[in-house]
Every structure is written in C-alpha cells, then in structure tokens.
C-alpha cells in the first residue's frame, strides 16, 4: 500500500523530537481522523536551521512529518512556507488516495510553526518583502 | 524472519487435511452436482456428506443447512430472504453487528423496512430487556451476533431467542466468529437462523452456510437454477463445500483441544501485557468472550502505525483505528462501546489460533514494549501526559 520511500521514513523517521527553546511551534489536529502533529523550528537569519516534530497518526502521517522536516531544514522561511502537501507527497513517491489528508496535516503544522515565529518577530524582513505573506493555499489553489 | 499470525478472526489457514479432501473435486470428480450422470452424482454425494458434517457441528439436521458463498451471503439471505415474504416490516439488529448484517439492514431500511439498532453496554453486550422493549407488532426479525468479531464479546443469544419466540418474531444470529472455534448448538441457542463461514475455522474461503430451522418462512433473494431446494441458486462449489465439511469434522474432533490451547495462551498474554506496557486497557468482557480474542487499547499511539511496526517485527495483527480503515472512521464497534478517541485509535486486536505457541507469545511480549516505546517517543500525546504528571 505504501511506497518504499514512505516505509523508509515511517520506519526510521528523521528529526523526531522536541526543540525546547524553539523559535516557532505549530500544532495541528486532523479533522478527518483525529490525529495530531506538533512541529518545532529553529530559525537563524531567516533560514530554518532545525526542525523537530511529534506525530500521533498513521504510517503516512509519520512519513510525511519526517519528509517535511528534511525538506524544510536549510530553507529560508519564505521557501519553506511554499512547501505544499503535494510536494511532500511527491517526494515520498506518492501516497494512497485516502492518505492525502495526512500530508495536509504536515504542511499545515510547518506553516503554523513559521507563522508562530513570524508573529513573534513582526519586524522580520520577510514580512516586509513578501506582501502576500505566508502561502495559505495549496497547489490546486484551494483554501486549506 | 519467522512470521507469527495473530489474526485468526480475519481468516485462518486452510488445514492440509482440508485441502487434500478438496483437491480431487477440482479435476477428477468435477461433475456438477445437479447433473444426473455419474460424475454429477458423485459430487452430489460428497456435498451431502459435507452437509451432515456441518449439521453435526452445530447440532442441526442436514436439511436445515443451506450452502452459501460465505458469511456475508448467509447474513444477506437471513435478513432479505425472510423480509421479502414477511408482511411485517420491522427488524431489530444490534449496533455492533458485522457490516454484513448492519449494512444489509440499513439497505432494507432504504427499501421501506423500518429498523431499530440496539445499543450495547461498555463491554459490548446487548441487554435482552432492550430487545423486548424494541419489539413492535410489526417486527418480523431480530438479528444479534453470537460473538463480536472485534472485541469477542459473546451475546446472551439464548435469552434473546426465547424473547423472540414468545413474541412470534424470527431470530437470526451471525455465528461466523464462533462456529468451529467454540461450541455452538442451535437447539440450545434457540435461534431460527445462524450464519457460519468455513474459512474462520481452517476451511477454505468462499464457502459458508446458513442454518434455517425447519418451517422458517424464507425465500431465495437471488434467482437462478433453484439449487438447495430453491433457497439458493448457483452451481454448487463442490471443492469448497467438501472442504467446509472436512473442516467441520476436524473442529468437532478438536474442539476442546482448540479452546484449551488458545485460552491458555490468551490468559498468559493478558496477565503479562500490563506488566510490560503501561497505559493499556483491555476492552470487552473478561468472562463472556471468545477464548482466542484479545482486544486492547494502547494509549497515545495510533493503531495503523502499531500494526505496521508489529508487521515489520513479524506479527500479523489487526486494529480498529480510523486511519487504518478506508472510510477513515473509527470502528463502529468501538464507537458503540463508548471507547474514547485515543483508546480507539490505539486499538489492537490479537486473535489466536491453534498453531500459535507459547514461544510466539513470549516473542510478542518482547517486541511489543519496544514498538510501543518507539511510537510513543514520536507521539505528542504521550509527551503532554508526562508533562502533566510533572
Ligand atoms: S493520520 Fe489518520 S489516516 Fe493518516
């Protein structure tokens, strides 16, 4: 049912854990099946230097968290805020149809962590430069 | 890696003796049992033998056995086959029925029947009094399962049957999980109909039966060649039926042994588990329960993840978590017993079989704490719980 990539990230999730003095925290609950994710980010010079997370959810949810953490580390806040659920699913070699909502969960949690950081650092350059702010639509242009 | 199969409620391996009995009926005695020639009659004889083997297992007479394609068809036949010719239009089922009963009843509701779905208590039991209260002048059928496929709770069918009989209402019980694994006697149960399925007791998949007490008003709901005295059309599945008969014979001979062996392992597992893993709860009844069933909730982890980690470690188990189902809904059974969301998401069903051993259980007891620990380490819920404690 899952791709090898998914199983790999599910079996050996990268960057699991909590950042005690995180610069941003994003917590989301899954309205579909009741699961949860919490993302923690560390930011330096508008770049995400570390990501950790905790996930209560299915194999896809865990693999998605792991993949997003890998994708986000080293990206600028702006770049990371444009990471979408589809990009994550693609990086995992695809997800079963009924599991796409789990990838929304991951992207949402990361974006929330970034928003959290930005709300605490309202003087940030990014906010001034990026007038549209954080991308809140997914690739299909639908509101999340 | 050695695989250990702990999912016998889903299906069981076909026993070699059963398979051996079936094989000649594919390409040697391949006649159609409805044909009058020798090939046909040989098949017909084999079917009649299987019929009496199956009847003996449940204390019925051969004439009361209708062969079907399995539990789902048996349940559909019981509900629709009696509903179609009944002038009355109300039926009663329990909230924890298998979907083969529950969804059939709901489909009938859409067709104009009226339906009462009875609640169950926190261990999954139907209160016979609630059945009594639910009966209306228009009620034609009550269908309550003998034992639940998820949590293993055994229902007070004898009491419900006598309430049904007093009220002049037909009584059906889905005994798919029970027949062949635990003693079943239709006279003792007092039911008018009973569903069973061969692959749940070491027989082949794709064959089952509906017991129909003599005199019960029922018609075929599938039209065709009028096999089974017009009650079930379709060419006889001779190899399957012969296999079901053999499986019934083995079950009868080994019944006590089967029960003792799985019960011993089950009880051992039940005493050891709480010592090895914290924050688990056993769901269902501790007394009125199928001897091979263990159903637990491992809090703060999600069932699909748990299942897949256990699969990696060599164990085949099952879960009622929402994430693992296609509908992404928590099992209706766990909802009906009022299990909270976290406990339902972390549900784990282990159903033992006669080929499981004490070593299997010991290995499982070694593996589970590690797997649960890994998943709890990732879980935000487990963390917040620890923080609360601080
Ligand atoms: S987290 Fe529930 S289906 Fe993925």
Image (cartoon, coloured by chain):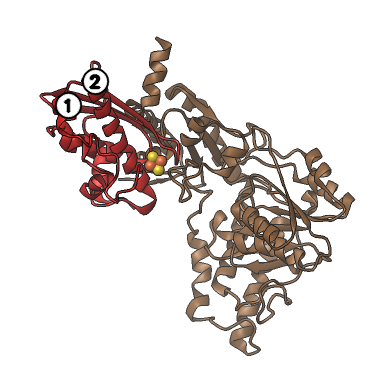
Chain colours: A red, B brown
Q: Chain of mark 2?
A: A
Percent from the top left, x then y, of residue B253? 63, 54
- Between the residue at mark 1 and the residue at mark 2, the CA separation in whole angstroms equals 9 Å
Secondary element type, mark 2: loop
The residue beneath circle 2 is: A19
Percent from the top left, x then y, of residue A122? 21, 21
Percent from the top left, x then y, of residue A96? 34, 52
Q: Is residue A7 above or below residue B251?
A: above
The residue beneath circle 1 is: A50
Split into quadrants, the picture shows ligand 1 in the one at top left
Mark 2: few/some/many CA within 10 Å (<14, 14-19, 20+) = some
Q: Is residue B202 above or below residue B120?
A: below
**Residue at 39% across / 32% down in the picture?**
B368
Please determine if labels 1 and 2 lie on a single subunit.
yes
Q: Are marks 1 and 2 in contact (CB under 8 Å)?
A: yes
Mark 1: few/some/many CA within 10 Å (<14, 14-19, 20+) = many
Which quadrant: the N terminus of chain B? top left
Query: Looking at the rendering, which quadrant does residue B124 occupy?
Result: top right
Q: Chain of mark 1?
A: A
Query: Looking at the rendering, which quadrant does residue B29 occupy?
Result: bottom right
Which sits in the foreground, B268 or A27?
A: A27
């Amino acid at each position: 049912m899952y791709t090898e990539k998914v199983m790999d990230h599910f079996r050996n999730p990268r960057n699991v854990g909590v950042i005690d003095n995180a610069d941003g925290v994003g917590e989301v609950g899954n309205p579909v099946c009741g699961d949860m994710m919490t993302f923690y980010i560390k930011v330096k010079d508008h770049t995400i230097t570390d990501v950790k997370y905790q996930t209560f959810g299915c194999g896809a949810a865990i693999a998605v968290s792991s993949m997003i953490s890998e994708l986000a580390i080293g990206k600028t806040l702006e770049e990371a805020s444009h990471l979408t659920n589809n990009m994550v699913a693609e990086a995992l070699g695809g997800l079963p149809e009924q599991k796409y909502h789990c990838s929304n969960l991951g992207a949402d949690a990361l974006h929330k962590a970034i928003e959290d950081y930005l709300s605490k650092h309202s003087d940030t350059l990014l906010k001034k430069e990026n007038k549209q702010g954080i991308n809140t639509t997914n690739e299909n242009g639908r509101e999340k | 890696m050695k695989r250990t199969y702990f999912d016998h409620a889903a299906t069981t391996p076909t026993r070699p003796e059963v398979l051996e009995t079936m094989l000649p009926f594919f390409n040697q005695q391949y006649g159609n049992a409805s044909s009058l020639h020798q090939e046909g009659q040989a098949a017909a004889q084999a079917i009649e033998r299987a019929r009496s083997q199956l009847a003996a297992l449940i204390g019925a007479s051969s004439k009361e056995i209708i062969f079907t394609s399995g539990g789902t068809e048996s349940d559909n036949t019981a509900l629709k086959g009696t509903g179609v010719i009944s002038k009355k239009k109300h039926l009663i089922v329990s909230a924890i029925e298998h979907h083969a009963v529950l969804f059939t009843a709901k489909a009938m509701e859409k067709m104009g029947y009226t339906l009462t779905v009875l609640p169950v208590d926190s261990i999954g039991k139907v209160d016979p009094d609630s059945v009594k209260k639910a009966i209306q002048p228009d009620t034609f059928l009550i269908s309550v399962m003998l034992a639940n496929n998820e949590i293993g709770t055994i229902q007070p069918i004898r009491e419900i049957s006598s309430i049904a009989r007093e009220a002049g209402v037909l009584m059906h019980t889905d005994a798919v999980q029970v027949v062949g694994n635990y003693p079943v006697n239709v006279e003792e149960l007092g039911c008018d109909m009973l569903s069973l399925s061969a692959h749940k007791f070491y027989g082949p998949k794709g064959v089952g039966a509906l017991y129909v007490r003599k005199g019960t008003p029922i018609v075929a709901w599938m039209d065709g060649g009028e096999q089974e005295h017009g009650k079930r059309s379709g060419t006889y599945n001779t190899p399957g039926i012969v296999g079901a008969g053999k499986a019934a014979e083995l079950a009868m001979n080994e019944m006590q042994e089967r029960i003792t062996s799985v019960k011993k392992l089950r009880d051992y597992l039940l005493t050891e588990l709480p010592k090895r893993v914290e924050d688990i709860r056993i769901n269902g009844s501790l007394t009125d329960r199928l001897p091979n069933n263990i159903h637990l909730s491992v809090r703060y982890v999600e069932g699909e993840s748990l299942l897949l980690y256990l699969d990696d470690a060599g164990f085949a188990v099952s879960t009622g978590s929402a994430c693992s189902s296609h509908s992404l809904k928590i099992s209706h059974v766990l909802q009906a017993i009022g299990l909270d969301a976290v406990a339902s998401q972390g549900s784990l069903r282990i159903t033992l079989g006669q080929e499981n051993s004490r070593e299997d259980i010991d290995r499982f007891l070694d593996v589970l704490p590690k797997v649960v620990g890994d998943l709890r380490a990732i879980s935000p819920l487990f963390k917040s719980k620890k923080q609360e404690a601080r």
